[in-house]
Image: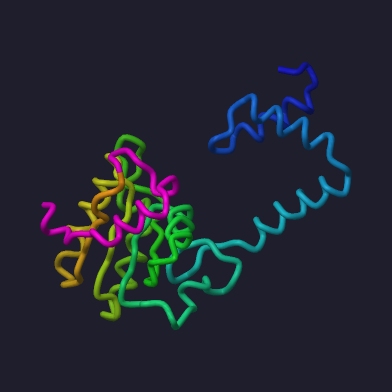
């Protein structure tokens, strides 16, 4: 603690963000105090604008500032192949790879009974609604290789089995316990290429 109440409160707000420890939060707070008033105002306006304009795409649940996100609105994408991911960071990771030309569905979480997250707590109803018209032929379950990611993948596999849609899972290249947003481009590409039917894993 610095002994300066306003500085400590500012650092505490930075420390609430994922991946930012106490020391990093203090450095950010001090850096902000050294910025010009114009720079600080620009940052505040950017945060306010982002909060006001960014929302979930009504189709895929990814974040966007448009009515529909650019991926869903792109007629050049393969709308028969749908990649299910945990959060928007995974979409960003796949888009950096530039090899996946399908569309996405963002769950905004994983099934985790230990943390009180049930299937109703993630965007599975929206996923089922997207499959209703028969456009989607393959669902790639691209949750991370963690206990929660595997449990969610298995649940989705069972949920979609009666629909007759092909359900596949990312293959080799993603180590157990690994988060997709930290995987390199080659690893993600190989995981996509080597995906397997979910039925083969059960």
In-front residue for pair 156/143: 143
What x and y, as percent, mark residue 77? 41, 77
Which residue shows up at 27% across the image and 62% down it?
193
Q: How many marks?
A: 0
Which residue shows up at 40% across the image and 47% down it?
183
- Farthest residue, direction front: 186
Residue stretch rendered in magenta on the structure:
175-202
On screen, residue 57 above or below 22:
below
In-front residue for pair 118/101: 101
Q: Quadrant of residue 127?
A: bottom left
Q: In the drawing, does residue 122 fall left or right of residue 166? A: right
- Farthest residue, direction bottom: 75
What x and y, as percent, mark residue 57? 50, 67
Residue 174 within the magenta-colored segment of the rendering: no
Which residue shows up at 32% across the image and 56% down it?
142
Q: In the drawing, does residue 27 fall left or right of residue 175? A: right
On screen, residue 68 above or below 34:
below
On screen, residue 179 above or below 6:
below
What x and y, as percent, mark residue 75? 45, 83
On screen, residue 129 above or below 119:
below
Q: Locate the N terminus by quadrant.
A: top right
Residue 184 within the magenta-colored segment of the rendering: yes
Q: In the drawing, does residue 174 fall left or right of residue 157? A: right
Which residue shows up at 83% across the image and 49% down it?
41
What x and y, as percent, mark residue 173? 29, 48
């Amino acid at each position: 603690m610095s002994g300066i109440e306003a500085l400590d409160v500012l650092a505490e707000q930075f420390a609430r963000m994922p991946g930012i420890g106490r020391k990093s939060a203090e450095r950010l707070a001090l850096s902000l105090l050294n910025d010009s008033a114009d720079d600080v105002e620009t940052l505040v306006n950017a945060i306010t604008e982002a909060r006001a304009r960014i929302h979930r795409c009504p189709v895929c649940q990814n974040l966007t500032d448009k009515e529909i996100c650019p991926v869903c609105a792109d007629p050049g994408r393969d709308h028969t192949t749908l990649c299910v991911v945990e959060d928007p960071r995974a979409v960003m990771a796949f888009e950096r790879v530039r090899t996946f030309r399908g569309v996405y569905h963002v769950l905004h979480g994983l099934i985790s009974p230990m943390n009180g997250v049930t299937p109703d707590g993630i965007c599975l109803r929206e996923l089922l609604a997207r499959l209703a018209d028969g456009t989607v032929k393959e669902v790639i379950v691209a949750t991370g290789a963690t206990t929660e990611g595997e449990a969610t993948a298995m649940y989705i596999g069972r949920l979609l089995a009666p629909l007759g849609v092909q359900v596949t899972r990312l293959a080799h290249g993603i180590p157990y316990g690994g988060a997709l947003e930290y995987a390199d481009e080659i690893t993600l590409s190989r995981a996509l290429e080597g995906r397997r039917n979910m039925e083969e894993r059960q």
